[in-house]
Image (cartoon, rainbow, N blue to C red):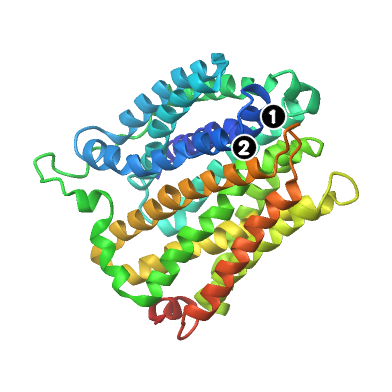
Amino acid sequence: MTATTRIKLSTMMFLEFFIWGAWFVTFGTFLAANLQANGTQTGSAFATQSFGAIIAPFIIGLIADRYFNAEKILGILHLLGAVLMYLMYKTPTFTAFYPLVFVYMVLYMPTLALVNSVSFNQIKDSEKEFGSIRVFGTVGWIVAGLLISYVLFWDSEENVKAGMLKNTFLMTSIASLLLGIFSFFLPKTPPKVNREEKVKLSSILGLDALKLLKDRNYVIFFLASVLICVPLAFYYQYANAFLANIHLAKPTGKMTVGQASEVIFMLMLPVFFLRFGLKKTLLLAMAAWALRYLLFAYGNAGDGAWMLITGIALHGICYDFFFVTGQIYTDSKAGEKYKSAAQGLITLATYGVGMMVGFYIAGLVKDAYTAADGITDWRHVWLIPSVFAAVVLVLFLFLFRERGTGPKGAASAA
């Protein structure tokens, strides 16, 4: 790979995740402060991500893989996203806002696969080269959060009340426009599938991998993956709103600690996985989810701020040790023929079904613990996903059986 190509791919990844982090982290806070959305409405708005995840395989499988270069579709989707983001910036009511965010997420979610396609098309050794390019995506997310908190101050208490968070959509619109234009200068990534080849719905949705569900152990893992997305949804939906509500200074910037921990624990994962094996790695991740929400429940913006920061920092263990480990396990169980289908199926089940259910549950819980005067009992809001994660942990502990340790143990779990 030439230096120019590496710079282009790294810039693409940076912008791709800057775009997501620039508005999604503060989204729940914006909805409550600017559009006066209740918990159920907020859950519906966040669930558009899940609809996007479910629809994305059709866009990739029916269009991107068959008819057009990936970089061109990436450019078109981001240009359309720039327009939608600008309209979201100008929209004053939730009723008018919801259709815009729905369409936006349907268009954005396929771009996550497209940037990977463009990258892998230029990479000879994915294990050695992809990580050094993908890390710029995490950097982009972190930079977006730091800009909002420490440069633009849009998430300060007075600026949130003044409606400044709507500017995150304008910033995202500009970034989307830049990536949309830049995409047409990325390395050419032609279609991988002959357009005359018959389309199989089962292949697009990853249903070819349903044979994995004949394995009792994999069914337990699969269900645990879907269920653990419920507490994950609470974090995405309400962490920023919670931190802002209890007056923690610069909450968006402080939440970038979670992305920094992702990088650290991603590097630690291979060592931990080799030493302790699949089951213990997954159990540690579930325990981290339960602990994180206990810390949120009993922390505060004063002398208990360390509990909040620790809860945020656990994101690397929560996410990497569960979802990345799960991808490795799925890959080992699928076999060469069904690798792509298996990853598609687990993604559809988690980011599609699991997260959608989680967002709606989080919204209902928030409404249940919000009084008529608008004051939320955050302690109980966070205790519910903590207990939920603990229950999933106990069930997984007793129902999942593992023989051996490390990657071989993952493959031979029975």
Residue 332 falls left or right of residue 389: left
Tell me the kind of residue under disc 1.
Ile
Q: For the point 38% across and 72% down, which residue is it?
A: 218
> Label 2: how many residues lie within 10 Å, few (<14), some (14-19) or many (20+)?
many
Label 1: element kind: helix
Residue 219 falls left or right of residue 387: left
Q: Is residue 264 visible?
A: no
Quadrant housing residue 310: bottom right
Of residue 83 and residue 260, the one placed in the foreground of this image is 83
Q: Where the C terminus falls, by quadrant? A: bottom left
Tell me the kind of residue under disc 2.
Val
Residue 231 on image: x %, y %: 58, 54
Q: Pointers 1 and 2 in contact (CB under 8 A)?
A: yes
Label 2: element kind: loop
Residue 195 falls left or right of residue 39: left
According to the picture, the residue beneath numbered tag 1 turns out to be: 148
According to the picture, the residue beneath numbered tag 2 turns out to be: 25
Q: For the point 30% across and 62% down, which residue is it?
A: 339
